[in-house]
Image (cartoon, rainbow, N blue to C red):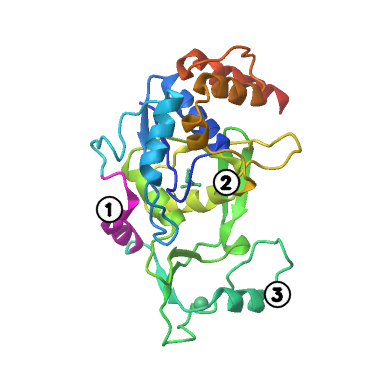
Amino acid sequence: MIRGRFAPSPTGELHLGHARTALLAWLQVRESGGQFILRLEDLDSGRVRSGSSDGILRDLAWLGLNWDEGWDIGGPHGPYRQSERQDLYEAAASKLETYPCTCSRLEVLQAVSAPHGVEVRYPGTCRSGVTHAHRKAALRWRVPDLEVHVMDGFNGEVKENVARVVGDITVRRNDGAWAYQLACVVDDADMGITDVVRGADLLSSTARQALLFDALGANRPRFWHAPLLTDANGARLAKRSGALSLRQMREGGADPKALLRDVALGLSWQINAPCQPQDLLGQWQIWLERIASQR
Ligand code: GLU
Ligand code: ZN
C-alpha cells in the first residue's frame, strides 16, 4: 500500500507552489489506490501563526483534495501535529550518538570562513566537550563519514557525504525545539510513509534524511523532488514573493478548477479546461515517463 503525505508548516498561508506540491503528492498516491496523510509541522513555535492550520485544511478542501488521516480527522498513526509527538523525537534521539553543542551560528561561520552561498559545514568544535558551558546547548548527531546514495524519482541519483558537506546535524535546537530533519524522518517512519513527494527546495535534505532513516533502523521511503514552480520571470514562487495566497484566491471567489488547470499547464500537462483533482488522475504517470525519457 502506497502511503504519501503533505506536511506543511503553519507559518503563514499556502501559495500556488504548495497547491502544486499537494496535488502531485495526492496524485501519486491516488493513482495507485494508496493513502494520503496530512501532517502539521508546527515545531518552530516562534514562527507558527494562529489560524494557519485551519486555513490550510480549508485551502486543500477548496482545491478538491481529500485525505485519509490528518490533524483534523485523526487516524491510526496520530497524533498528526508534530508539537504533540515530542516523546517520539526524544526516543529517537536517544538511539543516536549525540553531543551537546553551544556554538553560535556566527562562531560556526567564523570557524569555517565559508564563502557566501556555500553550505556551512559544522567543524565539530564541541565533539570533545562544549566550549561555552553557561549557554543553552543544542544537540548534534555525530554523523558517519560515508557517501549516501539515494535514487530520486525526478532527479536521478543523489550522492552526498553528509559528514563532509554539513557535518554533524542538529537534532534539537538550543531553544529546545526538535529539528526538522529528525522530526520529519521519525514521523515518515512511524506513519508508514512509502513515498515522499515534495518540492526540489528540499532536495538537499534527501541524503541527510536517508542517513537518519538508516541510523534509526527504519525503511527509507522513495523520494520525489519535483522541480519548483517559477513565475514568468523565472523567479521562484515563494511565500515572500507577494504572490496571492490560496486563502486570498479562495475568499476572492477564484475558481479552484481554473487554478488547477493553471498548475497543470505549469507542469506542461495537456489540460486545457478547468479541472478537478480526479480529472488529473493518470497525469502523474504520464509525466514521469516524459521526464524519464528526457533524462
Ligand atoms: N514542512 C516542510 C515545509 O513546509 C515540508 C517538509 C517535507 O515535506 O518534508 O516546507
Ligand atoms: Zn559546537
Which label was assigned to residue 113? 3
Q: Is mark 1 within 8 Å of ligand 1?
A: no
Q: Is residue 286 magenta?
A: no
Q: Quadrant of the C terminus?
A: top right
Q: From mark 2 to mark 3, how far is it between C-alphas?
A: 30 Å
Residue designated by label 1: 84
Across and down, in percent, residue 269 comes to 63, 18
Q: Which residue is painted at 63% across and 38% down in the image?
A: 228
Q: Is residue 90 magenta?
A: yes
Q: Secondary structure at mark 1?
A: helix
Among the 4 quarters of the image, the one containing residue 292? top right
Q: Residue at x 28, y 37 (%)?
A: 72
Instruction: Tell me where the magenta segment starts and ends, as one range.
Output: 79-93
Can residue 32 be seen at all in this image of the molecule? Answer: yes
How far from the left and from the top, in percent, is residue 152?
A: 57, 37
Q: Which mark is residue 46?
A: none
What residue would you read off at disc 2? 239
Horizontally, residue 146 falls left or right of residue 250, namely right
Could you tell which of marks 1 and 3 lies nearer the N-terminus?
1
Residue at 43%, 27% (x, y): give it. Answer: 62
Residue mark closest to the camera, 1 vs 3: 1
Q: Residues within 10 Å of mark 1 (few under 14, many from 20)?
A: few
Q: Looking at the picture, tell me which residue is in the foreground, 126 or 39.
A: 39
* Residue 167 % position (x, y): 56, 65
Q: Position of residue 282 (x, y in %)?
A: 52, 15
Q: Nearer the viewer, mark 2 or mark 3?
A: 2
- Secondary structure at badge 3 equals loop
Q: Secondary structure at mark 2?
A: helix
Horizontal side of residue 284 vs 269, given as left or right: left
Marks 1 and 2 sit apart, C-alpha to C-alpha, by 26 Å
